[in-house]
Amino acid sequence: MINAVNRRIDRWKTAAGRATAVPFLIRCGIALAGLLTIGVAWPAELLSSPRIMLPVLAVVFWPAAAPRGRGGTAVALTAIAGWLIDTAGYGSPVELWRVLALATLLYLGHTLTALAAVLPYDAMVNFDVPALWLGRALLVVLLAAVVIILALGLTADLGGEAFQLATLVGLVAATAVTMVLARMARRE
C-alpha cells in the first residue's frame, strides 16, 4: 500500500513538472469560478465556520484538480444547497443580481471544467483557444441573462398559483430530460 501511495506521489510530481501555463490557468479559472459561486450562493454566517468551509473548499477544488470526474457536479450541487439554505433557511431575499451571478458562475465553471477535461495538463496551447472558448461562454451567458430578464418581466403580469405550478412542472421536466440524456450518454 505504501508503494502505491509513493507511485501516486511520483506521478503527481511528474505531472506538476510537465504542466504548461494555459491548462494550469484554466484549472485556476475553475477554482476561481467555484469559489465565487460558493461566495454568491452560501450565507456568510456559514462560510465563516471552519467546519462548513473546509469541506466546501475541498469540493470547490475537486474539479480543478480532476476535471474528468464528478467534481463539477459536486460544486453545482453544493452551490444549489447553499442557495437553498440561504433563501429558505436564512430568509434572504431572491435578488436578480444574485440569480444572474450564480447562473453565470455555474456555467463558466462548467464550461471551463469541460475544456480542462479534454485538455491535457501538458498541452501546448495558444491563449486564443481558451479566449475563444470563454468568449462563446460569455455570449451564452449574456443571451441567457436577457431571456431571464424578459421572463421576469412576464412573471409580474402572470403571477399566482398557476405560475408556481408551471415553474415546478418545468423544473421536473428539465430534471427528467437531464437524467435521460445522462443515461443515453452512458450507453454509448
Image (spheres, helix red, strand yellow):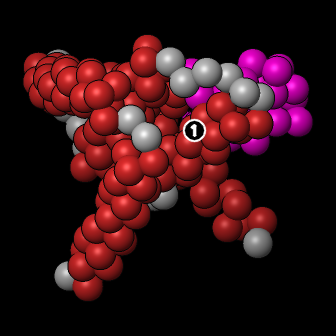
- State the image coordinates of residue 173 (x, y, percent, origin top left): 32, 64
Find out whether residue 78 is within the magenta segment.
Answer: no
Image quarter of the N terminus: bottom right
Name the residue located 31 percent from the left edge and 35 percent from the top edge: 158
Q: SS at mark 1? A: helix
Viewer-nearest residue: 15 or 106: 106
- State the image coordinates of residue 103 (x, y, percent, origin top left): 39, 31
- State the image coordinates of residue 14 (x, y, percent, origin top left): 48, 43
Mark 1 surroundings: few (<14), some (14-19) or many (≥20) residues within 10 A: many
Amino acid type, mark 1: Ala
Left or right of 1 in this view: 51 = right
Q: Main secondary structure of the magenta part?
A: helix
Viewer-nearest residue: 42 or 49: 42
Give the quadrant of residue 93.
Answer: top right
19 to 150, vertically: above or below: below
Residue interval drawn in magenta: 40-61
77 to 30, vertically: above or below: below
For mark 1, what is the residue? 79
Give the quadrant of residue 41.
Answer: top right
Name the residue located 43 percent from the left edge and 14 percent from the top edge: 97
Left or right of 44 in this view: 134 = left
Find out whether residue 48 is within the magenta segment.
Answer: yes
Name the residue located 61 percent from the left edge and 60 percent from the top edge: 7
